[in-house]
Image (tube, rainbow, N blue to C red):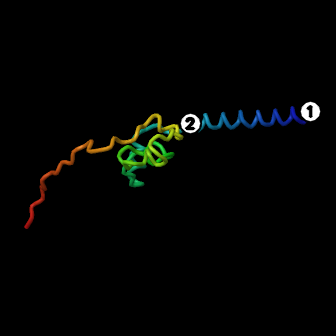
Amino acid sequence: MIRAIAYLALTTFLAAATTSLLLVGTTQSSDPSAKRQLVKVLGISDLSLSSEARYTRHPTQADVFAAFQDFPGAFEHFPTGSMIPPRPIGFASQVRIQPSTEKQD
């Protein structure tokens, strides 16, 4: 009898939690302008894709050897590592120097 009451209480709690999460998810705004304003207010420079490993946070912020912290043949132990590969080693991009448009006195 006690197990049945505990089961019903747990089921009721989980159903209420699921319902409340679904209601909150549908009422939140998916307007991109609100997200842009939040980024502007907080001063965030880049979009954060993940927070697990250093090299999966944002491809522009990864250091070269972050993927090989343990050793080069180590298995991937973060789920997002299978979706976002580490940056290629070497000079993958070029640096462009723009001439200054300001007048110097």
Residue sitting farthest toward the bottom: 105
Of helix, strand and loop, which one carries label 1? loop
Query: What's the residue type where badge 2 is placed?
Result: Gly
* Mark 1, residue position: 1
Badge 2 or badge 1: first in the primary sequence? 1
Residue at x-position 49% and y-position 38%: 80
* Mark 2, residue position: 25
Residue 38 is left or right of residue 11, and the answer is: left
Residue 2 is left or right of residue 42, and the answer is: right
Residue at x-position 36% and y-position 42%: 87
Q: Crowding near pointer 1: few (<14 within 10 Å), some, many (20+)? A: few
From the image, which quarter does the C terminus lie in?
A: bottom left
Vertical comparison of 87 with 102: above or below: above
The reply to whether residue 77 is in sight is yes
Mark 2 touches mark 1? (CB < 8 Å)? no
In the rendering, at what x and y percent does residue 51 appear? Answer: 49, 46
Residue at x-position 51% and y-position 45%: 52
Residue 102 is left or right of residue 64, and the answer is: left
Of helix, strand and loop, which one carries label 2? helix
Nearer to me, 99 or 93 = 93
- The span from disc 2 to disc 1 (Cα, nearest Å) is 36 Å
Residue at x-position 92% and y-position 33%: 1
Nearer to me, 2 or 98 = 98
The reply to whether residue 48 is in sight is no
In the rendering, at what x and y percent does residue 14 appear? Answer: 72, 35
Marks counted in the figure total 2
Nearer to me, 58 or 53 = 53
Query: What's the residue type where badge 1 is placed?
Result: Met
Q: Quadrant of residue 58?
A: top left
